[in-house]
Image: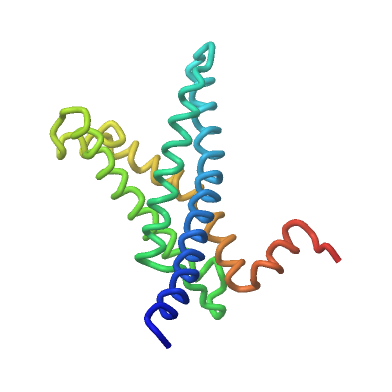
Amino acid sequence: MTNSTKNNTNKPGLKVKVEDEMKKAFELTIYFGSWFCAIAFMAATALEERPIPLSIFGFALIKAGISAKFMLIAQAAYPIKVDKKNGIVGSLFFESIVYIIVIIALNFIEAGVDGLIHGKEFIPSMTAFGSGDPLRVLAISIVYWLIVWPYLIFVGFNKVVGNTETLAVLFSSKK
């Protein structure tokens, strides 16, 4: 086999892998985006903000894209594994906590980088995440976990029974 043949066989694999990652990132961004837009809408109505600024939805979608990337980084570092002996919930509960810790840590770093972009110091900007309030960070963590948990259950179910069966269970079989 020549080098050019080896390179040609690797390229489709890489292309498929990149396309698969982009598809996962897009799907996860849509999933997180629907949650974050709903939360932003609820916050705007709770504050009785009228008219509701559309910019909050744009920020929610940007945050969703960033969170999706953070989730994919967490999955790359700590891949989802389902042990059939422990079931999906038992297998993924600890992983869900690890993912939330990674996502929150990356949010702290994101806040620091955002501060640098706006001419502030990194550490003070980083510690300002969640308004610097530990209870608010805990509240954000709980909300993130409640968003991530169903996604992990879906992914775990998909790993156990396969994509075709998962889609058939959720949306009925086309038979």
Instruction: Please state the horizontal and vertical placement of residue 51, each as a whole percent of the image.
Output: 54, 12
Is 74 on the left-hand or right-hand side of 30?
A: left
Extreme-bottom residue of the structure: 1
Residue 110, percent across and down?
28, 42
The mark tally for this picture is: 0
Q: Position of residue 128 (x, y in %)?
A: 23, 34
> Quadrant of residue 45 in the image?
top right
Horizontal side, residue 67 vs residue 41: left or right:
left
At a point 47% along the width and 72% down the height, the residue shown is 81
| 17 or 143: nearer the viewer | 17
Q: Is residue 123 left or right of residue 37?
A: left
Question: Where is 9 relative to 146, above or below?
Answer: below
For the C terminus, give its image quadrant.
Answer: bottom right
Quarter of the figure with the N terminus: bottom left
Along the line of sight, the residue nearer the viewer: 43 or 133 = 43
Relative to 148, residue 82 above or below? below
**Identity of the residue drawn at 25% across and 35% down:** 114
Q: Residue furthest top?
A: 50
- At horizontal 40% and vertical 75% (from top left) the residue drawn is 7
Rendered position, 107 above or below 8: above
Give the colour scheme shown. rainbow
Up the image or down, 32 lies above or below 53; here it is: below
Measured as percent of width and height from the top left, residue 19 is found at 51, 59
The residue positioned 22% from the left and 39% from the top of the image is 112
Q: Nearer the viewer, residue 83 or 33?
A: 33
The image quadrant of residue 41 is top right
